[in-house]
Amino acid sequence: MTSSLALNPQDRIAIEDLLTDVSIAVDDRDPALFDSLITDDIAFDVGMGALNGREDVMATFTGRAADRSFVARHLWTNLKILAVDGDTVRLRCAMATFAVMDPDGEPKRVWRCGDYFDTVRRTADGWKLASRKLFLALPDGPG
């Protein structure tokens, strides 16, 4: 395993762009964009149960994207490169989600904060999200 210093600035910027694009795809409910950002073997666990593989993740994403009972914004910050191993990078970043849910006609504000532990992989098409695991620092709460 090589040092995080082996990650050149262009790759770090590309990884930051990837993380931002993932948030935008989720917030904009854009399945095509989200699909373009993940690997075929993605492992994804952000509190809705563990999902494995593109088909599983995209089926769940597409269903959630069609649910208009909520609107959310996902933010990330404090990116820390944990390890670089060739074309694979493990990282951690803090996250916050702010949402308004209205499943019963009664709007409810919800916020979440915690840490994403991600693995990203360089592919022929650029950096892609290969895994994401969310660890909440605080329970869901009203905003």
Image (cartoon, rainbow, N blue to C red):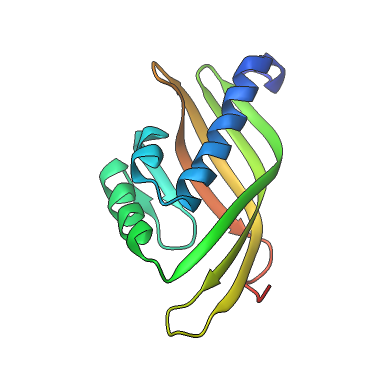
* In the rendered image, the vertical position of residue 34 relative to residue 139, given as above or below: above
Give percent across and percent down for residue 60: 32, 56
Q: Quadrant of the N terminus?
A: top right
The image quarter containing residue 123 is: top left
Residue in front for this viewpoint, 44 or 101? 101
Residue at 50% across / 19% down in the picture?
Answer: 87
Residue at 58% across / 28% down in the picture?
Answer: 15
Residue at 43% across / 85% down in the picture?
Answer: 104
* In the rendered image, the vertical position of residue 85 relative to residue 136, given as above or below: above
Count of marks overlaid on the render? 0
Name the side, left or right, on which 41 lies relative to 126.
Answer: left
Residue 1 visible in the picture: no
Residue at 40% across / 61% down in the picture?
Answer: 49
* In the rendered image, the vertical position of residue 20 relative to residue 27, given as above or below: above
The image quarter containing residue 142 is: bottom right
Q: Quadrant of the C terminus?
A: bottom right
Residue in front for this viewpoint, 123 or 119? 123
Residue in front for this viewpoint, 24 or 133? 24
Give percent across and percent down for residue 23: 53, 46
Give percent across and percent down for residue 141: 65, 74
* In the rendered image, the vertical position of residue 30 relative to residue 137, given as above or below: above
Residue in front for this viewpoint, 122 or 36? 36
Residue 44 visible in the picture: yes
Give percent across and percent down for residue 106: 51, 85
